[in-house]
Image (spheres, grey):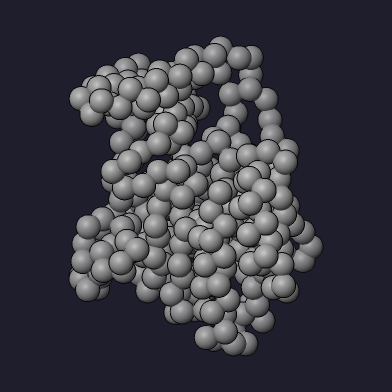
């Protein structure tokens, strides 16, 4: 029987995480017998109330493994701790990194398995991410990234879901991080070592230089030659977005502003240092102007802090 290991992180969003797990288990029941699934939940040091709610909602589920971190490790390091357990012998056939603010359609997992089994050359599969109302496409598999300006565009964003079949596939720069489904062999033997600005890390999977944002772009950059990225069209997932950064549509948080800029600067320094001379000032000027016009001085402060921290990081010995 095909086996799947699912990695999910929780931070101050127990209800969303429980709903995500319930949608996964419902999808498993819908096709009982085709696959077995083990779900690993890592809590990134949420407050005691949220942790208690998470435990109450998940403790009695045999296929769910819950672990509490002592500190907020971020996206990459948090998932890496789950992957230690998931990839222990015997490793599953597939690994799924899934955001906790996702609700999985009943047919999503069979669709992902059909796609993966039909194209073994694909190292990472993206899903069709929908807005919470299920009527509009948020991202059709993956995204396109401007390496000079550090801006991105989600494929198919804003397209009505009823026009899904008319939307063409594309060559992505990276798969949307809310749902990354991959053969376990991608993580075991399909990645080049993480690049680092200051030393090495304990695990070879997601790059822990990135606390939040750019982990999926880094992962794409490290795929071994011959491995591709693709979109599984019929894998439908409703994605709220922003739960891990306390951001909501139209209300970006200082945490998101800080980490997105710091990670953008780090990624460019590690992979495209020759473009940093344009990317760094262009991003700073554009974002500072937007924040000033909006009167978001809290975001401006977070932006400047990111640049200061990047300067310190860039001067650290390798």
Considering only vertical position in the picture, is 272 above or below 311? Answer: below
Report whether 14 appears left or right of 165.
Answer: right
x, y percentage for residue 69?
71, 45
Q: Name which quarter of the figure residue 250 lies in.
A: top left
Name the residue located 54 percent from the left edge and 79 percent from the top edge.
Answer: 26
Q: Residue 241: x, y in percent?
A: 40, 52
Quarter the N terminus occupies = bottom right
Instruction: State the residue at coordinates (69%, 73%).
Output: 61
Q: From the image, which quarter does the C terminus lie in? A: top right
The residue nearer to you, when weighing 305 against 13, is: 13
Residue 242 appears in view: yes
Horizontal side of 47 relative to 149 (left or right) equals right
Q: Left or right? Give the position of 20 relative to 242.
A: right
Q: Is residue 186 visible?
A: no
Residue lying at the far front in this picture: please name it. 49
Nearer-the-camera pick, 170 or 236: 236
- Is 257 drawn above or below residue 7 in the view shown? above
Name the residue rendered at 67%, 48% in the picture: 48
The x and y percentages for residue 9 are 59, 52
The answer to whether residue 136 is left or right of residue 173 is left
Q: Count the marks: how many?
A: 0
Residue at 45% over, 67% down? 103
| Vertical comparison of 58 with 49: above or below | below
Residue 295 position in % (x across, y down) = 25, 25
């Amino acid at each position: 029987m095909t086996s799947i290991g699912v990695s999910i992180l929780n931070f101050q969003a127990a209800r969303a995480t429980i709903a995500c797990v319930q949608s996964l288990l419902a999808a498993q029941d819908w096709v009982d017998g085709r696959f077995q699934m083990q779900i690993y939940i890592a809590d990134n040091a949420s407050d005691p109330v949220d942790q208690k709610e998470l435990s109450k909602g998940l403790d009695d589920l045999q296929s769910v493994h819950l672990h509490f971190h002592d500190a907020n490790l971020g996206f990459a390091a948090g998932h890496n701790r789950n992957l230690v357990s998931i990839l222990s012998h015997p490793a599953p056939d597939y690994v799924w990194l899934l955001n906790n603010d996702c609700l999985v359609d009943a047919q999503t997992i069979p669709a992902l398995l059909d796609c993966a089994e039909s194209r073994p050359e694909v190292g990472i599969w993206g899903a069709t991410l929908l807005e919470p109302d299920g009527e509009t496409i948020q991202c059709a598999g993956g995204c396109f990234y401007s390496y000079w300006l550090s801006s991105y565009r989600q494929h198919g964003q804003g397209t009505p879901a009823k026009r899904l079949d008319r939307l063409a596939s594309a060559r992505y720069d990276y798969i949307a991080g809310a749902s990354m489904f991959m053969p376990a062999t991608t993580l075991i033997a399909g990645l080049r070592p993480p690049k680092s600005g200051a030393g090495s890390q304990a695990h070879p999977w997601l790059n822990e230089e990135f606390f939040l944002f750019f982990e999926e772009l880094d992962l794409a950059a490290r795929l071994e030659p011959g491995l591709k990225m693709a979109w599984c069209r019929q894998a439908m997932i409703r994605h709220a977005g922003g739960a891990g950064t306390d951001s909501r549509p139209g209300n970006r948080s200082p945490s998101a502003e800080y980490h997105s800029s710091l990670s953008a600067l780090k990624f460019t320094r590690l992979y495209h240092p020759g473009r940093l001379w344009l990317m760094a000032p262009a991003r700073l000027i554009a974002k500072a102007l937007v924040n000033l016009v909006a009167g978001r001085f809290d975001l401006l402060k977070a932006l400047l802090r990111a640049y200061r921290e990047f300067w310190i990081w860039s001067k650290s010995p390798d």
